Image (cartoon, rainbow, N blue to C red):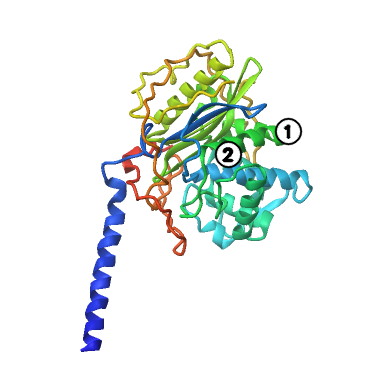
């Protein structure tokens, strides 16, 4: 009888597990979705020179960084270049493990490779997960060791709420950050590597016969924007860190929780407009994208005002490049859009439910999260709808 009861218990356990798996699989299609004003929303704008915070809306709430992770990967690469541990023309070999990463990716086969400079541009434009993993192995010996190095370096930069577990931003339950930490990283990339920061303004990257367009549409759409990185994961929506300069004033902003890249970019533009206004910078005429009708954000956390170069297109192409890469001219000047309306809401909960899928700006991909990682204490939330993905590029 004991054996029989154990068998029935095993069947019951398998049944419950199957039902739980089906429930998780259905999450991306549920009604709740990431959007400006949702529990996944957070934002910050700071002045780049001093780090003074101009706007703060849930900036210290934990979020999943998605491909914003690659900003830290690039920080480590730039540091290795500065210290002579690698060179721009050094060869990065694609291992089987790196080549197995889901899209977005360049699709280089195991044993193939590219130069460090090509890898930098592949991360900035295509947000290639396979290349990020290969760079981690190139710098750290293994991606796991590289992630440990990333975390330690992040802490030394003042990113106290950030932990990295991989070089790409693919789903991992333990890989978390905050809007404040990501904006801090964006600021340090500019101040610590002024001779490398221009890479983030790359609009197109020539790879073979392909012209890979940068996922960051703020370049050209927002006057003065010259970097830096976008990201998307179901658990935190569409995210971006943007740096822009007007009249000698540089701001760095970060926002999480957009339901689409369009909503995210327009909201980021509105936040930067408010930041420039607080710094006494005259308004600019809007671009066609930024001037389009915007649906006001719903129930956004209160943004707490804190008292108090135009786009550069860097280009580098692989040896097999054919033809000169295209360049996109800076958009016409823009003016401040109407200030974003906020109302006080309760503090957003901790990160949403365990990310089951990661898509970087139009590339469909799924990846199994770490199995042994403890879940945050927050109650799970519903990830974004599949319909929130941007149109294919």
* Percent of width and height locating residue 187: 63, 33
Residue 184 quadrant: top right
* Percent of width and height locating residue 329: 57, 20
Q: Secondary structure at mark 2?
A: helix
Q: Residue at x 23, y 73 (%)?
A: 12
Residue 146 vs 392, above or below: the answer is below
Quarter holding the N terminus is: bottom left
For the residues marked 2 and 1, what is the alpha-carbon distance in whole angstroms? 16 Å
Q: Is residue 106 visible?
A: no
Left or right: where does residue 24 sit relative to residue 150? left
Q: Which residue is mark 1?
A: 195
Q: Residue at x 63, y 43 (%)?
A: 74
Q: Which residue is mark 2?
A: 124
Left or right: where does residue 161 sit relative to residue 256? right
Q: Earlier in the sequence, mark 2 or mark 1?
A: 2
Q: Are marks 2 and 1 in contact (CB under 8 Å)?
A: no
Left or right: where does residue 86 sit relative to residue 260? right
Task: Please tell me which residue lies in front, 55 or 249.
Answer: 55
């Amino acid at each position: 009888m004991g054996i029989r009861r154990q068998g029935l218990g095993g069947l019951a356990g398998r049944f419950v597990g199957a039902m739980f798996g089906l429930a998780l699989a259905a999450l991306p299609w549920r009604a709740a979705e990431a959007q400006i004003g949702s529990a996944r929303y957070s934002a910050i704008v700071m002045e780049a020179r001093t780090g003074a915070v101009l706007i703060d809306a849930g900036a210290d709430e934990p979020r999943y960084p998605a491909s914003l992770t690659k900003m830290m990967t690039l920080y480590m690469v730039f540091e290795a270049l500065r210290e002579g541990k690698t060179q721009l023309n050094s060869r990065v070999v694609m291992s089987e493990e790196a080549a197995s990463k889901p899209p977005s990716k360049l699709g280089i086969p195991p044993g193939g490779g590219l130069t460090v400079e090509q890898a930098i541009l592949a991360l900035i434009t295509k947000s290639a997960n396979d290349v990020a993993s290969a760079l981690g192995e190139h710098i750290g010996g293994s991606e796991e060791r590289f992630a440990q190095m990333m975390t330690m370096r992040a802490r030394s930069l003042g990113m106290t709420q950030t932990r990295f577990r991989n070089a790409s931003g693919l789903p991992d339950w333990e890989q978390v950050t905050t809007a404040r930490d990501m904006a801090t990283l964006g600021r340090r990339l500019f101040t610590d590597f002024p001779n490398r920061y221009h890479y983030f303004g790359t609009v197109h990257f020539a790879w073979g016969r392909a012209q890979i367009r940068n996922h960051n549409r703020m370049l050209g759409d927002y006057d003065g924007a010259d970097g830096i990185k976008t990201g998307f994961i179901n658990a935190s929506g569409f995210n971006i860190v943007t740096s822009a300069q007007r009249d000698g004033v540089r701001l760095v902003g970060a926002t999480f929780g957009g339901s689409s890249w369009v909503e995210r970019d327009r909201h980021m533009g509105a936040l930067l407009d408010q930041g420039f206004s607080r710094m006494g910078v005259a308004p600019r005429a809007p671009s066609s994208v930024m001037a389009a009708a915007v649906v006001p954000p719903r129930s956004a956390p209160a943004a707490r005002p804190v008292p108090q170069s135009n786009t550069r297109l860097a280009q580098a192409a692989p040896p097999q490049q054919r033809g000169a890469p295209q360049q996109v001219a800076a958009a016409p000047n823009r003016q401040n859009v109407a200030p974003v309306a906020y109302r006080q809401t309760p503090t957003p909960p901790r990160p949403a439910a365990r990310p089951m899928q990661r898509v970087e700006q139009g590339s469909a991909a799924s990846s199994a999260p770490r199995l042994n990682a403890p879940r945050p204490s927050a109650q799970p939330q519903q990830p974004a709808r599949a319909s929130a993905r941007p149109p294919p590029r």
